Image (tube, rainbow, N blue to C red):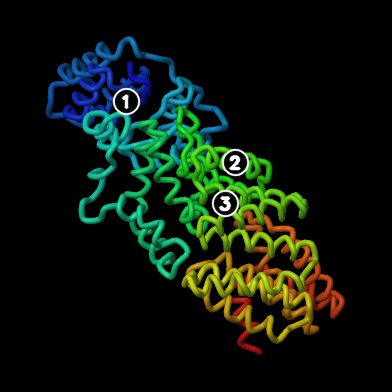
Amino acid sequence: MSTVVAVSDADVLVPILSCDLLLSAFDEDLYRPVVTATILDEIERKLVGGFTHLDPVALRGRVAHVAAALSLHMHDKGDVTAASIATVNRKDRHLVATALAHAADLVVSNDRRLRREVNTLGGPLLAVTGDEFAQRLLVDQPRGVSYRGLVDDTADPVELVERSAEAVGTADESRWFDELDAQRESVDTLVTVALAAGDGAAIAHLASLLWPYWTRHATDGADWLQRSVAGVERVLTQPSGELALLLYGAGLAAFRRGDNARCRDLSQRSLDAAVEARSARAEALAHVGLSRAAFRDHDWTRGLEHARGAGRIADESGDEAAALMALHMEAEIDRAAGEYAEAVPLYERLLEGDRAAGDIRAAAMELYNLGSVLVQIGELDRAETCLRESLAAASGHDPAQIAYTTLGLAGLAARRGDPATAGQLLGSVEAYFDAVGEVLDPAEQLELQSHRVAAESAGRAAFEFAYLDGRSIAPRDAAAVYLDTR
């Protein structure tokens, strides 16, 4: 018997062709339905109220036919008052409550709002359209699903996703992100269908390509990574390099949300999968993930061990991108430990590597990092040059990087004895970080505090007044005002 369990909305079961198709699929044991009296009542209301030119007795007979066909799968509806589904609109809450109460995999609905609400709950339950569900049941195989053809043939999302390897870490990365933005619905459909099929290998494949987009650009990327990990965990999946990359990406998302325990757990599982699959790239990145976790724990020794281990593996396999990520963690740990002079040449090497690769995003980040370290050792003019270049590189496509670079500019203003400007910049940055839930790394936490101390020493009252004013200004605008006056 099929293990796929689905709750269908009335809007999928009212059209005769759609209803007959799903009943036929049920007869062929392709899925297990869950139906309630509430759903049947809604079907009857839509039929009788929407087709007034037809015989109501015949229409009610149609509903009775559906009820008879699904009689062995009638259930009570779930708890519509559950706090976990409070974000679902009241009209459709009974569907989601029923799906959760009876461990359904899918809610099948043509209502875009309901699908969005279900797919943002963050758990294993997913929502798909009637057409997507029919495609999965009657066209694709339960495993080894071909995801082509689910969307407009004029733009193949599979081909777009699979451009990840050639785009990430190059000058084409931002363009690839923009193209993914433009095809988000199609790309989301690919992942949703893989999750609905319970195809662990396909989930890992897609997520291993999409994690850079999900962690660096998409605002809902962490949720997609969490859903992908949950989808893989529900099936027996052989360790693979792709699975290891998915776990690494999910660990990175957890790190950025401040959940260091989950970052450590996912990174360790990534390392285990990578070693078993003999994937050098995934193994190097897993060590980077474990280095991050140790870094957040202020365990500099263990952090450096993992970072240098990642570097060795990357160097031996010729993976320049992974080598740069490992070197970045070495620099970050030196910086967090207050070894600013030692960190400078590391950031310079990173910047050189990013520029050689054409990776504008990474170059903007390392220019900020180098500029911030130079502020700490008093090389203020050179620091300003780096921070200006960082802001220019990040402008237009990376609001988080703009905020971090503005943090560096706040330190610059404070060291130059300008408490009002430093206050406005810090107020702007901290308001942004509060709004997006950004958790600062140990180095940034220490540096932010040092900027505040330096600014307050130059004029506490001016700093505090400007700080409050700055909280209503976007970092981009606050930075522009400061640099325009220089």
For the point 59% across and 41% down, the residue is 266
For the point 41% across and 28% down, the residue is 105
The mark nearer the N terminus, 2 or 1, is 1
Q: Which residue is mark 3?
A: 284
Q: Where is residue 160? Give x, y as percent.
A: 33, 55
Name the residue furthest right: 457
Q: Where is residue 324? Give x, y as percent.
A: 57, 63
Q: Secondary structure at mark 1?
A: helix
For the point 33% across and 32% down, the residue is 108
Q: Is residue 400 above or below residue 250?
A: below
The answer to the question of whether label 2 and label 1 lie on touching residues, with beta carbons closer than 8 A, is no
283 left or right of 153?
right
418 left or right of 41?
right
Q: Secondary structure at mark 3?
A: helix
Of the residues tagged 1 and 3, which is closer to the observer? 3
At label 1, which amino acid type do we have? Glu
The crowding category of the residue bearing disc 3, from other C-alpha atoms within 10 Å (few below 14, some 14 to 19, many at least 20), is many
At label 3, which amino acid type do we have? Ala
Q: Is residue 235 above or below residue 2?
A: below
317 left or right of 6?
right
The answer to the question of whether label 2 and label 3 lie on touching residues, with beta carbons closer than 8 A, is no
At label 2, which amino acid type do we have? Leu
The crowding category of the residue bearing disc 1, from other C-alpha atoms within 10 Å (few below 14, some 14 to 19, many at least 20), is some
Q: Which residue is mark 2?
A: 266
Q: Is residue 337 above or below residue 35?
A: below
Of the residues tagged 2 and 1, which is closer to the observer? 2
Name the residue furthest bottom: 486
